[in-house]
Image (cartoon, rainbow, N blue to C red):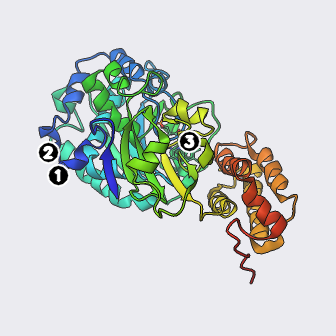
Amino acid sequence: MEIKALGCEPLSLRRVFIKDGHTLDVYRKDGGYKSLKKAMTMTQDAIIQEVKDSALRGRGGAGFPTGMKWSFVPRDNPKPKYIVCNADESEPGSFKDRYLMEYDPHALIEGMLIAGFALGSNTGYIYGRGEYRYLLDIMDVAIKEAREAGILGEKVLGNKDFSFDLHTHTGAGAYICGEETALLSSLEGFRGHPRMKPPFPAIEGLYASPTIVNNVETLTSIPQIIEMGGIKWRDLGTEKSGGTKLWSISGHVKKPGVYELPMGYADMEKFIMKDCGGMLRKDKDLKAVIPGGSSVYIMNAGQIIGQNVTLDYEGLVAAGSMLGTGGMMVMDETVDIMESTKNLTEFYKHESCGWCTPCREGTDWLVKIFNRISTGEGRPEDAQLLLDICDNMEGKSFCPLADAAAWPIQSAIRQFPGDFKKWLFDNVSSNGVKPNVQ
Ligand SMILES: Cc1cc2nc3c(=O)[nH]c(=O)nc-3n(C[C@H](O)[C@H](O)[C@H](O)COP(=O)(O)O)c2cc1C
Ligand code: SF4
């Protein structure tokens, strides 16, 4: 497992390489909480402007500009305001946030404090999935250290006008609780169902009060931005995709791990084939890559090799996919894409919260058809049937989980028609394996 920065100094990963970097003592010696002190000398508008200037886009998957989101919070609203960190990290293929919380918990606390100061909030919550209990235990230790040092609680660092405290909360491991409004429902103690948007959480979120929900990586970038200045931080990346980004790489590469790259890193082929050590088995070629966590379009090798795909939001859209969370899954030619897509679809069916019909019924039907195909009972028209069901889900459901379930299937059939044809017409996988019929 590699953890390294390429093409830039480690910023988000900086304290992974420092012994005891997770402790308050070492964090402070390494310049920790200086950005908070600096932020507290600035106006709220000036902090939000720095974040806007940084071109930081939310690292939780949707890529919404963070400064713009912060500017939506009505600061004259008399209700309490909340800063919520989305530490659910439930997207298959994504495993970056866990390293930030494990190795650099104080950077997250500092980012949330700065957000709290900028938006007039006194309370923050860190919401993680049930499996991340051990990380929230690490966060609790760091929160206690910060409280005892006067960094959290009443009068932050002696500032009589600013109090801020933080609490951790675990869900029970439901993927949907990573969706920001379902997360807020769960945090309030209700079942984790998504809520109607608008109103967006920035206007009416936790306890119907203005709430900012940001991903772990987004919030840990905030102290860097305040320290360097927004423009300087943006210039580490590109004009539209500022800063650096963490990528979680798994699958058939020799050196899977978490890599920090400047936005706009060139290029995807070099990254996979050289930086990540190339294909795991040297006699097996690259077949497919899901570049941004399971909820984005799958790419075939032809979309990557020789195509100079830059690793940023714009580059991946131009190449036919999306950046998502940066959870890159690499597959060699031994993988049958019908089977890998079936596997993902089973996940989405399991995780559909059941609230709305197109997603609840659609994911169930998709799995039924995939099961039929994989047991050798597939029909020639089944690929079209899968696409029709996806069409009835995409954009027609209550929250984006249904889109996330449809996109892998639509792109798999588009990019790997041969794998589906083999199953539908010859009843064998692309590797010639016969179905295992009981
Ligand atoms: C089904 C689903 C699951 C999600 N899971 C996560 C997650 O685990 N972590 C996360 O940060 N964002 C997740 N998101 C995105 C959040 O809804 C939200 O956009 C994000 O937390 C906002 O933070 P950001 O602006 O910093 O990215 C998910 C979205 C959907 C639709
Ligand atoms: S789209 Fe799926 S996960 Fe989202 S509300 Fe509807 S049933 Fe629930």
Work out whether mark 1 precedes mark 3 in sequence or the reverse, and give the earlier one: 1
Q: Position of residue 158 (x, y in %)?
A: 16, 29
Q: Give the secondary structure at mark 2.
A: helix
Residue 286 sits above or below residue 84 on the image? below
333 left or right of 437 in image = left
Work out whether mark 3 precedes mark 2 in sequence or the reverse, and give the earlier one: 2
Residue 300 visible in this rendered orientation of the protein: no
Work out whether mark 2 precedes mark 1 in sequence or the reverse, and give the earlier one: 1
Picture residue at 24% right of the left edge, 38% below the top: 153
Q: Are marks 2 and 1 in contact (CB under 8 Å)?
A: yes
Q: Position of residue 177 (x, y in %)?
A: 54, 50
Residue 3 sits above or below residue 112 on the image? below
For marks 1 and 3, give the CA distance: 35 Å
Q: Give the secondary structure at mark 1.
A: loop
Q: Are marks 1 and 3 in contact (CB under 8 Å)?
A: no
Residue underneath mark 2: 26
Which mark is in front, 1 or 3? Answer: 1
Q: Position of residue 353 (x, y in %)?
A: 65, 55
Picture residue at 77% right of the left edge, 64% below the top: 422
Residue underneath mark 3: 181
Of 362 and 432, nearer the camera is 432
Residue 395 sits above or below residue 421 on the image? above
Residue underneath mark 1: 20
Q: Position of residue 145 (x, y in %)?
A: 19, 47
